[in-house]
Image: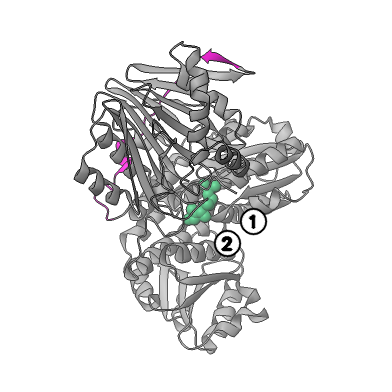
Amino acid sequence: MCGIVGYTGTRQASDVLLTGLSRLEYRGYDSAGIAVQHDGAMQVICRTGRVAELRSSVEAVGAPGRCGIGHTRWATHGRPSEANAHPHTSCDGRIAVVHNGIIENFAEIRERLADQGHDLRSQTDSEVVAHLIEEAYPRAAAADDGDALVRAVSETLGHLAGSYALAVICDDEPGTIVCARKDSPLVVGLAKDGAYVASDVVAVLDATRDVVMLADGQIACCRPDGIACCMMQGDALAAVEPRTTHIDWDLDVAEKTGYPDFMLKEIHEQPRVIRDTLAGRLVGNSIHIDELELTAEELNLIDRVYIIACGTSYHAGLIAKNLIEGWARIPCEVEVASEFRYRDPIITPTTLVVAVSQSGETADTLAAIRDARVKGARVFGITNVIGSPVAREADGVIYTKANKEIAVASTKSFLGQVVSLTLLALVLAQAKGKMTSGHIRQLYTELANTAELVEQILADTEAIDEAARACTDAASALFIGRGMGAAVAHEGALKLKEISYLHAESYAAGEMKHGPIALIDEGFPVIAIATHSPVYDKVVSNLQEARARGAMIVAIATQDDEDISAHADHVIRIPKVRDAFSPIVASVPLQLFARSVALARGCDVDQPRNLAKSVTVE
Ligand code: F6R
């Protein structure tokens, strides 16, 4: 949520900042701004709307200078407007701040600052930071040790409750950017031409692959020739050695590479994600997830699993519940993190809590992890982002190998999560002695084969596009399925509503006659997950009931299903796999279906309204 960039070096700062912001736009896109230092003065340009609008304004007025900070916003406090866009400045305009996160005690700070005569010009929580630094700076400068801005920032942090990633510049220290973070990511990239600051490595990849991922509580002072890091220790600052991580991602992750949008590109990456997530996991006839950091005996003792997640990641959890209970015979509950954290779930030392989060930053999921750990559970993370808060705070982590996901709607990360959770279910079944090694090898081989089957689906999308055309003008749609198909239906409905703004609901198909069937009238789209499964006949009965009331049926069915055409208006055929793996092949056409409907309705599939990629606020 919100993207931060900064640069100090030999290049034109505004170019670097605008390129970085366009790479971070997936984090928020209601307004954007930059502050650049030139000849001892600060120039601030903010615009509502996308980074492209900001770019036009910057190009129109010109913004010379070799040091600056920038921000792309997802509004929390105060509506999208130029006044609320970052950077925010101090009263004298000599200090500029960009912030990601929430300052929880901003209201009381704001009141105090206003009483002291500060002129607060926005409705945001972030602006107080610039004014607090303005208050602290003269005291810090009195020490005359060349680190006044670092000291002023560190004093300011002592007043803040909540979460933050911050980048600050001050006209009294040209060429210096001071950054700090707590519960919100921030990286500094080191290159020959200067130091780069960003919320996410994608914004710095074209300049450098060597980055310092700031730790919680760390403050970094970035200058053109390098960075110095320190931590608060009581009132003093203790120097810490910056730890550099080399990122070996290809810059292609941040480019569309010929695809019309990131969503389509990422959908097409899914066969690779399946292969990479599985690579090296089968050793002999057993599955290895060494990152779990649990011995076979400890795994065997696990008697309850909670999967906690939000949104699409929660749907991956629903799929895994069926596998963990079916294969390992361990009771498994799946819960949205925002509920879990405020309940008092039954957790014992033999409970395994699995936190699933693409971004690894989701505030509710992180809070749930902390809560579960306090209650004594082993917590395992499944995330896509190396070094993310989920990865750091869990006892062990599997990375989903999806690589950076830019489109706001999750596709390839979802598949990576499903495959990772499937591996976890196999490991648990193995530890509990519920499967022979031959059975495990067989399942692994079939799971690996799904990569090729997904390629087949991607090669021919005509039936998907045709079904999408039939639904484009609908006011609403229902997704139904049973068992694994119910979880797929939930994900299909979420994908459709978030990118096409077409109202969509999902139900376990057996629930239809307990209420939702009342919605059905002539032409109402019902998307039924009717894949090969033990409950196939039941799903067909449910879709017949809907059709008898006028519904237009779109069925996701297996290639060899000869009967389904008699019951559906549109059939999207997918390769036949065992029920356990049907979500992998069935969710891909639903992603494409949602995208097709969204495009036909004129929507921006990569950056849907009101959403942002990382939900770092409650
Ligand atoms: C939907 C989507 C969201 C996320 C949710 C959790 O396409 O992407 O529903 O799944 O915000 O995010 P993570 O997985 O980053 O915790």
Residue at 38%, 54% in the rendered image? 267
How has the structure been colored for display?
Answer: one colour
Asked whether 196 or 541 is in front, the reply is 196
| Label annotation for residue 322 | 1
Badge 1: residue crowd in 10 Å (few <14, some 14–19, many ≥20): many
Residue 238 picture location, percent across and down = 56, 14
240 within the magenta span: yes
> Quick check: 279 left or right of 16?
right
Which circle, 1 or 2, is nearer the viewer?
2
Residue 124 picture location, percent across and down = 50, 47
Residue 337 picture location, percent across and down = 64, 50
Badge 2: residue crowd in 10 Å (few <14, some 14–19, many ≥20): many
Stretch in magenta: 236-260
Above or below 498: residue 548: below
Could you tell me if residue 426 is visible in this image?
no
Res 480 → quadrant: bottom right
Q: What residue type is labelled 2?
A: Ala
469 within the magenta span: no
Residue annotated with mark 2: 487
Q: Which amino acid does label 1 sit on?
A: Asn
| Label annotation for residue 303 | none
Do the numbered discs 1 and 2 sit on residues whose CB atoms are within 8 Å? yes
Res 574 → quadrant: bottom left
Above or below 510: residue 150: above
Asked whether 404 or 240 is in front, the reply is 240
Residue at 20%, 46% in the rendered image? 60
